[in-house]
Image (cartoon, rainbow, N blue to C red):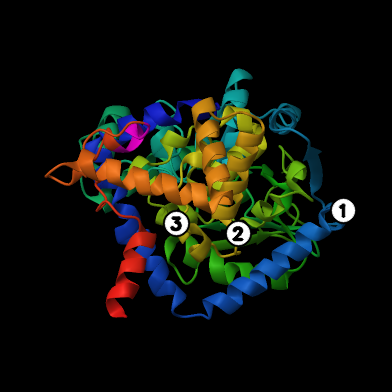
Amino acid sequence: MQVQTMQFKARAGQKLADQRLQQNLTKLSTKFVSARASAMTAIDFPATRTALKDRRNRALENLDVWLETFEREATRRGATVLFAETTQDAAKLVADIARKHDVKKVIKTKSMVSEEMRLNEVLGQMGVQSIETDLGEYILQINDNEPPSHIIAPVVHKDKEEIADLFAKTHQKPRLTEIPEMTREAREMLRPHFMTADMGVTGGNFVIAETGSVALVTNEGNEGMCTVMPRVHVAVTGIEKVLPTLEDLATAMRLLPRSATGQDVSNYFSVLTGPRGVHDQDGPEHMYVVLVDGGRTGLIGGDFQEMLRCIRCGACMNHCPVYQKVGGHTYGWVYPGPMGSVLTPSYVGIEKALDLPQAATLCGECNSVCPVGIPLSDLLRKLRERQVERHLRPWQERFGLAVWGYLAMHPTAYGLLTKLAVRILERMGGSGKSIAKLPLGAGWTNTREMPAPVGRTFRELYAASKTHIG
């Protein structure tokens, strides 16, 4: 997926004006938010989150040790483990595997790391057909390879009618409008690909060091078809996804489905360990695990290491008031929402994602729902600070912050200026007591009116109230 983060403001305006998208995005609150809240009542969320946070920190604090352990155990069980420093390196490794095994067709499960790698594009350039088998990803692929807008529900921005039109056009069949019939039609279209693919590519929700296993979580069962049917299975995932033990995995699975889709358990949960053995009834002949750095080690030991705890549940974006209004495509890269506003600048460079740290109200809702306790609003604030320090923000903004900082350090000057400001603003409000155009505040008044203050500062009002009471 190409980086288009510099277009955030323009895209946000377009998405806000898209009434159909606005209606479709209500599914986030009516489905995911309410379902998560209900699912969390069955467990002690604060205690379970603390436990998972500690376990994720344990893995990250000794990341090299656990990765070496995973490589050793996976190799001992017959899998081949490969490491890629960049996403381009990772795509080349997968392409080399396909070439080695004379692969003509690849079937894929949903994988955000493969989006980082632009894997479908790379495989297509070498003449290998790549088929997305997650229903949402399949819909996007047949819609001119549209990128996903959500990491869990990639097609949340479309409604049933849009998909019905797309199926009728692409499949050349009568238009269906009932969801069971539409999903059956998609299965009928995908079944031949499952039966004829040479290689399956999946992500990896976690990799388990003590057993050398890859854990996959889905709701459609396509991961089973992608790992059992083809003779070659390749799992691609980030190096931060390693967990030391199966006990750690059990803790993670108490929170991942609840945070992601509001389910107590996911419909399908696979722990894959090595290729098919002599006495196994099914499984691939060859298994590869490609572990991708792609900028992740750059976060270790720094201000943003906590972001590596992320388990990609999507809860932060489901609850984010900004994401709920502009959708995922506005963010311009693989990871949208609050998590993307931290990860994208960290992975592709802060200078290529100037607006993303600003794309948040800092309300803290993402902090509240994160299953691993990532302080996303604090990390966004740190990114804003770095932008100012590196002079990446407009000079007017930096000048305004410098003036504010000076006044905050000099209470007398602050008091005098605010007294003057509230009186001027009161007059600007007129009889309607609202300000339609505000100098230096057009970003607010271009889309809404600002209530005029009463003409006295809080300090003045507070002092008057004390005098009145006395």
Query: Which kind of residue does numbered mark 2 sit on?
Result: Ile
CB contact under 8 Å: marks 1 and 3: no
Q: Say if 23 sits above or below 254 in the image.
A: above
First in sequence: mark 1 or mark 3? 1
First in sequence: mark 1 or mark 2? 1
Q: Is residue 362 visible?
A: yes
Question: What's the CA distance linking mark 3 and mark 2?
Answer: 14 Å
- The circle drawn on residue 68 is 1
Question: Which structural element holds mark 2?
Answer: loop
Q: Which percent across, then down, holds residue 59?
A: 77, 61
Using the rendered view, name the quadrant where residue 36 is placed.
bottom left
In this orientation, which residue lies closer to the viewer: 379 or 132?
A: 379
State which region is magenta: 440-444
Using the rendered view, name the quadrant where residue 121 is placed.
top right
Q: Quadrant of the C terminus?
A: bottom left
Identify residue for label 3: 363
Identify residue for label 2: 374
In this orientation, which residue lies closer to the viewer: 439 or 362?
A: 439
Query: Which kind of residue does numbered mark 3 sit on?
Result: Cys
Farthest left residue in view: 431
